[in-house]
Image (spheres, grey):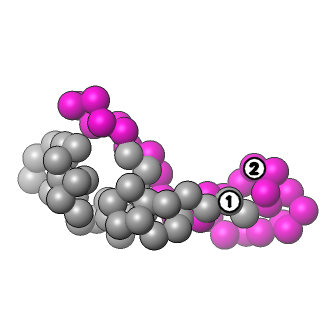
Amino acid sequence: MTKEPCDGCGQPVRIGGGIGDFWSFSTESTQGITLEFDDGGEFFLCYDCIDRLPDDRAATSEDVKAL
């Protein structure tokens, strides 16, 4: 199991798969994803932070910084 900090809230987020899960046979899924924004920003965010991004327009790097 590997963890990476969320770029929004800073909390450690589980990244499933890969060699880290080979011997543990962990069945937990990944708890976040990397998003690329139209303004060139790229952020790894947990699902809670993704839910906090605006729904009424395209999210930007500034929206992530505001989290």
Q: Looking at the rendered structure, which numbered label has been put on residue 28?
A: none
| 48 or 5, nearer to the observer | 5
Amino acid residing under circle 2 = Gly
| 24 or 42, nearer to the observer | 42
Residue at the image position 85 percent from the left and 68 percent from the top: 24
Amino acid residing under circle 1 = Thr
In this rendering, would 3 be left or right of 18?
Answer: left
Q: Distance between the residues labelled 1 and 2?
A: 9 Å
Q: Pick whichever of labels 1 and 2 is earlier in the sequence.
A: 1
Residue at the image position 25 percent from the left and 53 percent from the top: 64
- Quick check: marks 1 and 2 in contact, CB under 8 Å? yes
Which quarter of the image is occupied by the N terminus? bottom right
Q: The residue tagged with tag 2: helix, strand or loop?
A: loop
Please name the predominant secondary structure of the magenta segment in the image: loop
The magenta region covers 14-42
User: Label 1, on which residue?
Assistant: 2
> Hey, which quadrant is residue 21 in on the image?
bottom right
Q: In this view, does 67 lie above or below 65?
A: below
Which quarter of the image is occupied by the C terminus? bottom left
User: Label 2, on which residue?
Assistant: 18
Residue at the image position 73 percent from the left and 69 percent from the top: 27
